Image (cartoon, rainbow, N blue to C red):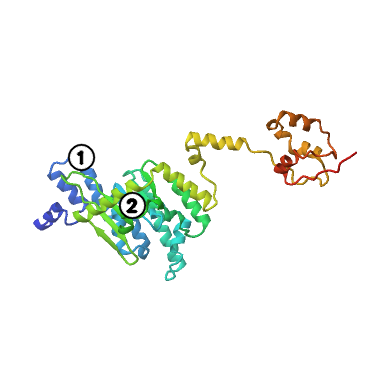
Amino acid sequence: MQCSRQKMWRIESGLGPARPLDVKVMCELYAATPELTAALTALATETKAKSWWHSYGDAIPDWFELYVGLESAAPRLREYDDALIPGLLQTRGYARGVYQYRSRISEQERERLVEVRLQRQTLLERRLPPAPQFEVILSEAVLLRVVGSPATMAEQLRHLLNVSVLPHISIRVLALSAGLHFGAVAGPFVMLDFPLRNRVEPDPSVVYSESLTGVLYLDRKDELAIYEEVWTSLTSLALDEQQSKQLINKIIGEVYHGRADRRTVAQEHPQRRQRRQLRRSRRQPAWPRRRPRQQGLGWACTHLLPHRLEQLHPGRQALLRRTPTGAHPVPRRVLPLAARFRGRVRRAPTTS
């Protein structure tokens, strides 16, 4: 290989980069299989290539580049947030709403930040390597806090319902009725877990906690143990996935006046669905918008009471059926019934 012993030591110890040619020669020296040789040579080639986020330049801070690299390598992501929708699940409109209050950046820089956030979301759609398992717990306050506009929030919540059907994405909501919990003290965080690979112990997990001016990367065992306890507490208090979908769908319809997701309605409890369908079947036809002013019991029999006759006493049914249309005296016992259906009914003058 025509290199020094120090270079060989750095390559074998993983402390320095290796050229594809050096990797190929070393594989031949160590009698590696052709498949392993091809794989290691390809990895050595990829180490020289720049990742996608380098093309965005200053739009990604230096301290965030490390997280993007860890995020793309971790097979499992666990995130809790009580302020905003996670960046991997934000829509374009919601992401613009997040950056709209940053007055120090120009419109062009703002659009680049939005593009970076959307580009990160391709992580959840990739096939090779497989997309990571993404588990999210959101406070209910995140769903109620308006970012952008009510229409933007309705679109964002529908997006959460759409992506939650993917097998590797889990979205759960921590209701406000849960009261004070451990996550309120810990604040938003992301836990990145790494595979075992060929080691006796897996690579340690990393806890990522972001602030306005920087981030914290926590990987010590005592720190990870505390955040594992926080995550366990949050999972025990949060709604399950089906209940979370129903709550999100309810907020869309009641808070943001959007159309509810029919799939969630179809998955409601069968007895509740039967009661709702029964109430719908009992709805009465719409009343005529206008009615003649001076009409007696005949008008009431013609327009107001035909569909109610079956619910009356047989004697009263016969009385109403015998009454012809026109101005006739209205019996006092019929007046309250007609008034209940259509406001106040004028009593026609008595004819001799």
Q: Where, by quadrant of the figure, is residue 331 drawn?
A: top right
* Percent x, y of residue 168: 36, 43
In the displayed structure, 176 sits above or below 330; it is below
Residue at the image point whose x is 18% and y is 49% from the top: 23
Q: Where, by quadrant of the figure, is residue 309 drawn?
A: top right
Taking depth in this image into account, of 109 and 267 the one nearest to the observer is: 267
Q: CA distance from mark 1 to mark 2?
A: 40 Å
Name the image quarter holding the C terminus: top right
| Residue marked by disc 1 | 34
Q: For residue 2, say whether it is visible.
A: no
Residue type at mark 2 is: Glu
Query: Which is nearer the N-term, disc 1 or disc 2?
Result: 1
Residue type at mark 1 is: Pro
| Residue marked by disc 2 | 79
* Percent x, y of residue 279: 59, 37
SS at circle 1: helix
Residue at the image point whose x is 48% and y is 41% from the top: 264
SS at circle 2: strand
Residue 274 is left or right of residue 102, and the answer is right
> In this figure, what is the number of numbered marks?
2
Between marks 1 and 2 in the image, the one whose residue lies nearer the viewer: 2
Determine the residue located farthest toward the right in the rendered image: 352
Taking depth in this image into account, of 214 and 182 the one nearest to the observer is: 182
* Percent x, y of residue 60: 35, 62
